[in-house]
């Protein structure tokens, strides 16, 4: 064995240590909830620097600042919608006329899911954890159902756009696919709506939600608005972001000058919203800065793990090379569902996107990138650790209402939901992508 071989072996051991710290930290966090998830990833990033897996002078180059700007912008607009009461108002407006337990489950799932597609799922998860349980109790249903409805709804709903969740934004930027908003909506929009409806029916059946009458809604919609100006501002800002992203997609498709670093769009709109808001200090306090920190240190930690080569054998085993479209879709789906349970879906996507590009995947492989977005997101429905939004919901429900769900129970229901969701997505995506030559 040469010195080079020994050096590589040592790097793989060090990379394995960092990976073990992340997995162990996530596992311990499920029992010791006072450990924030960002501290686990921050310690992993610290180790990559100390062990020499990354060059400390190049750390700023490892961070994708376009993604960070996107998150700051979208989290800020989500916080504005939350503090003003807009998000709760939208949900209550839809639910106010519900007359049965079945209607509550169905409308909650559809509303929260569709809002998550354009307001970032983590923000909707935080908001929903404050209001879903009272509605589930009003329907006379098991409080445990409130966790599952919210978790599955925000996960599924966020799949259909590149602004629905952080991993989709990562894919939209890292892949370089053209017109990401248009592409995601075409390939993932219709099956997302179907999956929201089907998931609601599955949950209603599992928890015996029938035609029983409600006990009374805990709040009328108008009571949810705490600041009418900020609520109007939040709604207008979110619509403006979607319109600008859509216009940018059109310009790109027509070959005209457009913005390539699309994270600047929600960041700029949010900056304007802060100026116009009546309570900017209150809004900025509600931004999930811990998630921003998590992403910054995650980029560093994942770069160290990737450069160490410790995962090469596993990635090669799951996807040895770029193959046929059908083969790529199958392998990406399996890898996403499995590895997202170890790393959580965002760190997994960051690593796997690098690996896919090393195999030769480019912006032209739209179906493969859409599959990664779909499968890595839906993987969040399989276990509690599959998505950060699950942890946000459970922590909030436990601290505020004393309601929780076991890891095993979540996985039991989640396995059924994930299997059904995945089949529906693939049954739609594959023929449509082939028809549109994506």
Image (cartoon, rainbow, N blue to C red):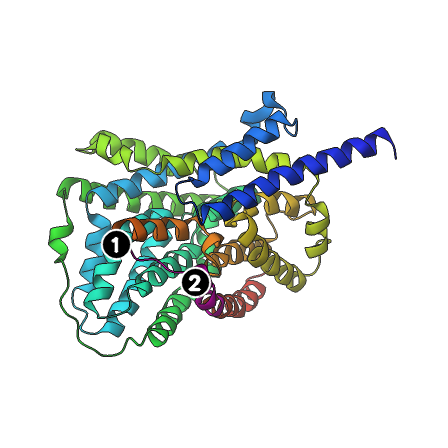
Element carrying mark 1 = helix
Choose top left, top right, bottom left or bottom right for residue 78.
top left
Q: In which quarter of the image is the C terminus?
A: bottom right
On the image, the x and y values in percent for residue 119 come to: 33, 48
Residues shaded magenta: 402-416
Q: Nearer the viewer, residue 411 or 427?
A: 411
Q: Which residue is found at the position 70% from the left and 37% from the top?
A: 13
Query: Would you call the spot at circle 1 few (<14 residues within 10 Å), some (14-19), or many (20 or more)?
Result: some
Q: Is residue 287 left or right of residue 324?
A: left
Q: Verify whether residue 283 appears in magenta.
A: no
Height in image: 215 above or below 126? below
Choose top left, top right, bottom left or bottom right for residue 288.
top left
Q: Which residue is found at the position 16% from the left and 68% from the top?
A: 97
Element carrying mark 2 = helix
Q: Which residue is found at the position 48% from the left and 33% from the top?
A: 296
In this figure, which residue is indicated by the disc labeled 1?
401
On the image, the x and y values in percent for residue 413 come to: 44, 68
Q: Which of 312 and 140 is in front in this view?
A: 140
In this figure, which residue is indicated by the disc labeled 2?
410
């Amino acid at each position: 064995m040469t010195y080079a071989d020994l050096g590589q072996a040592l790097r793989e051991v060090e990379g394995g240590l960092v990976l073990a710290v992340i997995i162990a930290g996530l596992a311990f966090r499920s029992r010791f909830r006072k450990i924030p998830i960002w501290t686990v990833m921050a310690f992993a990033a610290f180790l990559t620097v100390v062990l020499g897996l990354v060059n400390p002078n190049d750390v700023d180059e490892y961070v994708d600042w376009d993604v960070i700007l996107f998150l700051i912008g979208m989290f800020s607009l989500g916080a504005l919608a939350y503090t003003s009461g807009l998000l709760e108002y939208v949900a209550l407006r839809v639910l106010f006329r519900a007359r049965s337990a079945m209607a509550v489950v169905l409308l909650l799932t559809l509303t929260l899911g569709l809002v998550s597609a354009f307001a970032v799922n983590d923000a909707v998860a935080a908001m929903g954890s404050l209001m879903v349980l009272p509605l589930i109790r009003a329907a006379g249903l098991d409080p445990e159902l409130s966790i599952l409805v919210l978790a599955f709804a925000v996960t599924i709903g966020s799949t259909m756009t590149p602004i629905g969740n952080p991993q989709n934004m990562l894919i939209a930027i890292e892949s370089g696919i053209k017109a990401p908003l248009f592409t995601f909506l075409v390939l993932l929009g219709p099956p997302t709506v179907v999956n929201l409806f089907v998931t609601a029916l599955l949950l209603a059946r599992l928890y015996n939600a029938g035609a029983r009458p409600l006990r009374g809604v805990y709040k009328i919609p108008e009571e949810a608005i705490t600041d009418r100006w900020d609520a109007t501002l939040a709604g207008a800002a979110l619509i403006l972001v979607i319109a600008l992203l859509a216009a940018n997609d059109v310009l790109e498709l027509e070959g005209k000058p457009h913005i390539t670093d699309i994270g600047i769009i929600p960041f700029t709109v949010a900056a304007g919203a802060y100026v116009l808001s009546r309570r900017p200090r209150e809004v900025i306090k509600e931004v999930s800065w811990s998630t921003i920190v998590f992403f910054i240190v995650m980029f560093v930690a994942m770069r160290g793990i990737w450069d160490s080569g410790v995962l090469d054998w596993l990635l090669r085993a799951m996807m040895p090379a770029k193959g046929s479209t059908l083969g790529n879709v199958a392998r990406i789906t399996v890898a996403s569902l499995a590895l997202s349970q170890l790393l959580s879906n965002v760190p997994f996507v960051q690593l796997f996107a690098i690996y896919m590009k090393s195999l030769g995947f480019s912006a032209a492989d739209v179906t493969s990138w859409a599959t990664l977005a779909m499968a890595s997101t839906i993987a969040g429905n399989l276990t509690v650790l599959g998505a950060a939004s699950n942890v946000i919901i459970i922590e909030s429900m436990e601290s505020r209402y004393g309601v929780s769900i076991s890891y095993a129970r979540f996985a039991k229901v989640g396995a059924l939901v994930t299997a059904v969701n995945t089949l529906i997505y693939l049954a739609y995506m594959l023929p449509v992508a082939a028809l549109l030559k994506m």
